[in-house]
Image (cartoon, grey):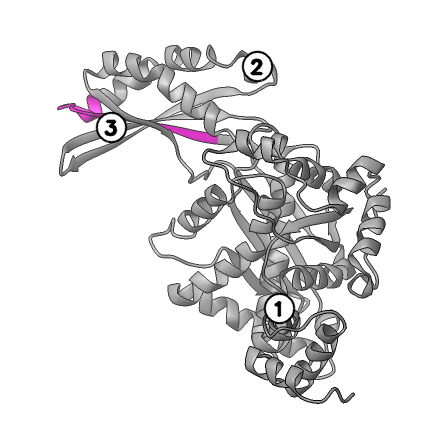
């Protein structure tokens, strides 16, 4: 059984951390070596993944600890370049353990394929004609992917949306609702849309234009909930009740103001995207769906909610589209993506999506807690100080010395770092 607690992890060297994770996640010698060396993605493999390849580009890969999700400890690989993200998520996960960690759930892995029909003078009649042939179209779509059918997936239903008055006349859009199982599903639903396009033209008398998935995966939702008591959130400087009040006020700001909501939701995605990247999934698709979902009520708002329970606890929730997969694409091609999934010990795409939103909720809590107390810069800049020290020209043992001086002076800047390096080395 995996133990996600990572005590003193920050004080370890990268090699020591890797050894700890390798033992915790039961990695073999080859997997340990894959993480230990740079350039884990072979150039030949990269050349097969995309076009015009000239090399590979690496990001830091870390592991967030202390996550307990539905009673199970989870180690969470994260690939990201920004300081403070992994630390904040891990710390909020650690505090969440006092109340049982994160509780998650999700809907089935349903994706939408859209078939756009133009050139119809009777759009509502065309809609009913398509629905009349629903079973035939579903059968046609499923005939193209016997493997998916064998796994229990396939096209489940058809919806038809009518846009009666556009600058180009009436438009009808058929949605194929497809259970894609443990795939992200883009290729599957696109192929099904292509398959039924000709028959839909015959049925409606119109012209099919686009046949493509929708990244607003509003039938494929993942949810997470977390609870923090006032005692858990209390610090030397702030009473727990004040922290809770500050977090709720900060959330409400995002709920009512799209300017704040944009940054608020970016902070949520600070936690989610690194998990998506580390597992070889399409973070652009997840981002697109998240922000579209945040606007589903006609106004852009927060993806999370934070409220106070009857006993005074702070309760946070998140619900959002999570179109991720365990099979196909880079999840199978990229060696480190496969390794990240092993470290996480996930058995389904739904479970991966639930972990991702739990990390997003933790990240959001970390940001709101910092913003409503000491301010975001104090903790963030302290963690950012190593990057600044490197940019100022520090190397070797000088890095820690410059970081210590900058943080103590509360002046984390390249100019100050350079001045320290040019001055005497007093302790």
Closer to the camera in the image, 336 or 236: 336
Mark number for residue 325?
A: none
Residue at x 51%, y 66% (from the top left corner):
251
Q: Which residues are magenta?
A: 111-125
Residue 325 visible, this angle: no
Q: Residue at left 60%, top 72%?
A: 388
Of pointers 3 and 2, the one earlier in the residue sequence: 2
Q: Which residue is mark 1?
A: 387
Label 1 residue SS: helix
Whole-angstrom CA distance, mark 3 to mark 2, is 30 Å
Q: Residue 147, labelled with which disc?
A: 2
Q: How many C-alpha atoms fall within 10 Å of the one at disc 3: few (<14), some, or many (≥20)? A: many
Q: Quadrant of the C terminus?
A: bottom right
How many tags in the picture?
A: 3
Q: Position of residue 326 (x, y in %)?
A: 62, 32
Residue 403 visible in the picture: yes
Where residue 327 appears, as percent x and y from the top left, is 61, 28
Quadrant containing the N terminus is top right
341 falls in the magenta region:
no
Q: Is residue 187 left or right of residue 134?
A: right
Question: Which mark, residue 172?
Answer: 3
**Residue at (56% x, 52% y) in the render:** 318
């Amino acid at each position: 059984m995996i133990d996600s607690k990572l005590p003193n992890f920050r004080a370890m060297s990268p090699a020591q951390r890797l050894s700890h994770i390798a033992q915790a996640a039961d990695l073999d010698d080859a997997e340990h070596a894959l993480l230990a060396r740079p350039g884990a993605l072979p150039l030949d493999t990269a050349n097969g993944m995309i076009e015009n390849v000239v090399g590979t580009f690496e990001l830091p890969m870390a592991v967030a600890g202390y996550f307990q999700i539905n009673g199970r400890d989870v180690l969470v690989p994260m690939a990201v370049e920004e300081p403070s993200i992994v630390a904040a998520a891990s710390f909020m996960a650690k505090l969440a353990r006092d109340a049982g960690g994160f509780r998650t759930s999700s809907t089935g892995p349903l994706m939408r394929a859209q078939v756009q029909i133009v050139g119809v003078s009777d759009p509502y009649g065309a809609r009913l004609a398509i629905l009349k042939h629903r079973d035939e179209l579903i059968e046609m779509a499923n005939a193209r992917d016997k493997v998916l059918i064998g796994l229990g997936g396939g096209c489940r239903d058809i919806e038809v949306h009518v846009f009666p008055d556009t600058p180009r006349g009436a438009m009808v859009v058929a949605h194929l609702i497809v259970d894609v199982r443990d795939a992200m599903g883009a290729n599957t639903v696109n192929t099904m849309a292509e398959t039924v396009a000709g028959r839909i033209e015959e049925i409606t008398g119109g012209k099919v234009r686009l046949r493509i998935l929708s990244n607003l995966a509003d039938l494929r939702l993942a949810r997470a909930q977390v609870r923090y008591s006032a005692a858990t959130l209390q610090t030397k400087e702030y009473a727990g009740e004040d922290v809770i009040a500050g977090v709720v006020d900060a959330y409400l700001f995002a709920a009512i103001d799209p300017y704040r909501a944009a940054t608020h939701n970016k902070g949520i995605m600070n936690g989610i995207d690194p998990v998506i990247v580390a597992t070889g999934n399409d973070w652009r698709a997840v981002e697109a769906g998240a922000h579209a979902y945040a606007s589903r009520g006609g106004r852009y708002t927060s993806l999370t909610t934070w409220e106070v329970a009857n006993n005074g606890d702070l309760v946070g929730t998140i619900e959002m589209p999570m179109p991720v997969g365990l099979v196909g694409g880079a999840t199978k091609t990229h060696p480190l993506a496969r390794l990240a999934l092993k470290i996480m010990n996930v058995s389904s795409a739904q479970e991966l999506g639930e972990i991702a939103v739990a990390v997003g909720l933790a990240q959001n809590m970390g940001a709101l807690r910092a913003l409503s107390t000491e301010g975001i810069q104090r903790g963030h800049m302290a963690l950012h100080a190593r990057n600044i020290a490197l940019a100022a020209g520090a190397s070797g043992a000088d890095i820690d010395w410059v970081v210590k001086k900058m943080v103590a002076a509360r002046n984390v800047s390249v100019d100050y770092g350079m001045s320290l390096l040019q001055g005497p080395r007093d302790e």
